[in-house]
Amino acid sequence: MSPSLPIFWRMKRLYVRFMLAFLGHGLAKASSSDKTISKETAALRDGFTFSMGVAPNGPVLHMRKDNGRLVKVAALANRPDVDIQFKHLGHAFGTLSFQEGTTEAFARERMVVDGDIPASMKLVRCFERLEVLTLPKLIARRIMRHYPSVSLMEKLVGATKIYLGVTAGFVMGNKK
């Protein structure tokens, strides 16, 4: 990043990059530990890829389905099956800082989805489930169109597994 960019803009960019990495590690762990997310991703073919990033050259998350689970990868060799692009860094920041939900951001045309639309809907359901498990109920209810009934034990166990997986992902990087 250029040192001439305003510090607030650079901080937003770093936050968005961190949250995309968090989302990637969280989905990777949840795809093997949470029954609801596993069920959604089971319908995706092995080798399925998706990316989520900020247009035109902002931070980006790349993931691929390998051996029945999602894994975070550094880059994709080919065009992804689903490409989710925020139109602006400010839009990504608003969504990833939980000021508005993913569905609301899409409805307000803050992001563009290109590729397999049914698969993208499965991913949105995975993102929402991840929000339910990892965010406090007060925050998650504000950004979701419908907050599902989740027991406290299910939420605690799910969040613990996901946060441990995220921590391991950051410590170990993209190693399998």
Image: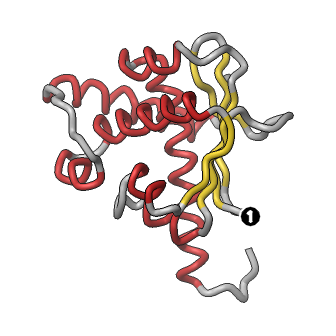
- Report which residue position mark 1 lands on: 56
Q: Is residue 21 left or right of residue 139?
A: right
**Residue 136 or residue 81, whichever sits in front:** 81
Residue type, numbered disc 1: Pro
Residue at image coords 41%, 49%? 103
* Residue 58 in picture, x, y percent from top left: 69, 62
Residue at image coords 66%, 37%? 82
Question: Would you say residue 96 is visible in this rendering?
Answer: no
Q: Taking 63 as reference, is 55 above or below it?
A: below
Question: Which image quarter: residue 81?
Answer: top right
* Residue 80 in picture, x, y percent from top left: 74, 36
Q: Taking 22 as reference, is 97 above or below it?
A: below
Q: Is residue 174 left or right of residue 20?
A: right
Question: Which image quarter: residue 132?
Answer: top left
Q: Taking 161 as reference, is 166 above or below it?
A: below
* Residue 167 in picture, x, y percent from top left: 48, 38
Q: Quadrant of the N terminus?
A: bottom right
